[in-house]
Structure formats: structure tokens, C-alpha cells
Image (cartoon, grey):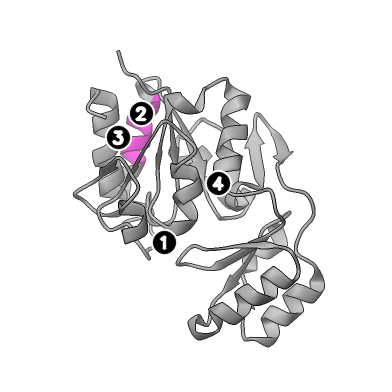
């Protein structure tokens, strides 16, 4: 009997062809459908906005709740569940823009978590601004995410699992970046693609040989076959 009832998967760097790519891996899509056909619910847990995350889940066949905005928002059975309250103030946004940070186009569709494209040499300055306003920040490797306290992928996935009656101990998470660490630590077991950030590789239970989506497919086969 397969132990795991759910797989919680990050998107960028995990279901994409490799870390840094925005192209969804066809091997990852096939793996999602294999998991679902085996009775294992797949949840997408992403820093992307809810329309992107929920839309992707629908088209690739991930039937579990969609957790977006780094855990701040969940979409399940046609309704939106808000995990976070409020959003970063306009004054914070203005200060980040004055440092050269450019808002993501997805911010128009975000409820709580705002994303900014990063001039890397100003990242420390940006984090000081975030702290001044009492917000929390995650750097995904793709963008700097700023949100009110109380979010994070770990919080979001636990709330989503409650909605479908699955215990975190019955769930395995797959991610590749530092912002995935709360997700990876919130459930029963964790894994990552072969090209994941070294900080992620240091804490997970299994590191795939293949990168990106091919690594996810490798992990999914082991989950279905009982090897993880």
C-alpha cells in the first residue's frame, strides 16, 4: 500500500524544466497525472499569484487545493481562503521602487504577497525596508516576495491539507528554493530536484539525480512505487 496520500509541489524550479526556467516540464506534467491516477492528491504550492497557480493546476491535472502567494491564499472547490491579512503598505512599495525594485505584473492580481524583480546588489537594503514596516520577505531566486506576518508556504500547505482531510504526516513535499524550506519542513517527508539550492539539498530526505521537472518525475515514481 502506498503510504503517501498527498504530494505538495512547488512550481518554479520544481515543475519547470530546470531551476531558473519558466517552461513547464512535460515529464513533470505526466508525473502529476500519474500521481493523481494512483490516488495521490497533488497540491501546487507557489509564490505565484492565485490565477496563475490555480489555472496551472487545472490544466496539468493537479486536483488538490492550490496554494498561492507563498502560502497567503488558497483556492479550493471554487472558493478563496485567505490565510494572511492585509498587504504591504504603499509606502513600503514606494521605498522599494526608489531602490530600483520593479513590481511584478502579477501584483495586480495579488491579495497579500507582492513580488518585486530584484537588483541583487540592493537586496540587503530592501530587506531592511521590509523589516522597518513589520512585513516578512522571501527571496525565491526569481523575485523578492513581501507579505504580512503569518504566511509562508508551510502555513499555507497545512491549512490546505485540512481542507481535504489529509494529515501533514501523510504528505511529501517537493521544492527547490529557500522559500520552499517552510513547506519542506511542514510535512512528513521532503525531496528536491537535483539542481535545487544547496540549502534545500541539506535538509530534504531525498535529492533526485535529475534536475527540475525530470527530478520531480523521478520523485513521483518513487512515491507511487513505495520507494520513498
Q: Secondary structure at mark 4?
A: helix
Q: Is residue 185 above or below residue 2?
A: below
Q: Nearer the viewer, mark 1 or mark 4?
A: 4
Mark toward the start of the polypeptide (1 vs 4)? 1
Query: Which residue is identified by label 3?
Result: 220
Query: Which residue is identified by label 2?
Result: 35
Near-viewer residue (66 or 27): 66
Which residue is at 41% across, 61% downward? 22
Label pair 2/3, CB-CB below 8 angstroms: yes
Q: Nearer the viewer, mark 4 or mark 2?
A: 4
Q: Is residue 222 above or below residue 87?
A: above
Query: Label 2 vs label 1: CA separation?
Result: 22 Å
Q: Secondary structure at mark 1?
A: loop
**Which residues make up the magenta segment?**
29-36
Mark toward the start of the polypeptide (1 vs 3)? 1
Q: Nearer the viewer, mark 1 or mark 3?
A: 3
Label pair 4/2, CB-CB below 8 angstroms: no
Q: Secondary structure at mark 3?
A: helix
Q: Is residue 81 above or below residue 210?
A: above
Query: Which residue is identified by label 1?
Result: 22
Left or right of 211? Residue 44 is: right
Mark toward the start of the polypeptide (4 vs 3)? 4
Image coords of residue 129 (percent x, y): 69, 76
Q: Determine the main secondary structure of the stretch shown in magenta.
A: helix
Which residue is at 59% across, 49% downward? 152
Left or right of 159? Residue 186 is: left
Which residue is at 19% across, 49% downward? 209
Q: Which mark is residue 153?
A: 4
Q: Which mark is residue 99?
A: none
Query: Label 1 vs label 3: CA separation?
Result: 20 Å
In which quadrant of the rendered image does the C terminus lie? top left
Mark toward the start of the polypeptide (2 vs 1)? 1
Amino acid at each position: 500500500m502506498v503510504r503517501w496520500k498527498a504530494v505538495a509541489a512547488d512550481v518554479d524550479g520544481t515543475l519547470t524544466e530546470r531551476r531558473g526556467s519558466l517552461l513547464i516540464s512535460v515529464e513533470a506534467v505526466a508525473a502529476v497525472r500519474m500521481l493523481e491516477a494512483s490516488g495521490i492528491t497533488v497540491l501546487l504550492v507557489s509564490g505565484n499569484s492565485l490565477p496563475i497557480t490555480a489555472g496551472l493546476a487545472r490544466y496539468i491535472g493537479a486536483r488538490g487545493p492550490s496554494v498561492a502567494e507563498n502560502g497567503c491564499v488558497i483556492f479550493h472547490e471554487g472558493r478563496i481562503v485567505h490565510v494572511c491579512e492585509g498587504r504591504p503598505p504603499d509606502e513600503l512599495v514606494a521605498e522599494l521602487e526608489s531602490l530600483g525594485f520593479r513590481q511584478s505584473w502579477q501584483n495586480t492580481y495579488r491579495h497579500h504577497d507582492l513580488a518585486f524583480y530584484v537588483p541583487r546588489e540592493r537586496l540587503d537594503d530592501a530587506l531592511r525596508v521590509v523589516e522597518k514596516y513589520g512585513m516578512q520577505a522571501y527571496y525565491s531566486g526569481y523575485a523578492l516576495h513581501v507579505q504580512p506576518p503569518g504566511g509562508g508556504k508551510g502555513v499555507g500547505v497545512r491549512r490546505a491539507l485540512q481542507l481535504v482531510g489529509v494529515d501533514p504526516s501523510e504528505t511529501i513535499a517537493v521544492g527547490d528554493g529557500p522559500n520552499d524550506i517552510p513547506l519542506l519542513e511542514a510535512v512528513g517527508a521532503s525531496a528536491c530536484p537535483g539542481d535545487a539550492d544547496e540549502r534545500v539539498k541539506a535538509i530534504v530526505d531525498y535529492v533526485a539525480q535529475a534536475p527540475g521537472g525530470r527530478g520531480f518525475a523521478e520523485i513521483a515514481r518513487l512515491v507511487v512505487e513505495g520507494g520513498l
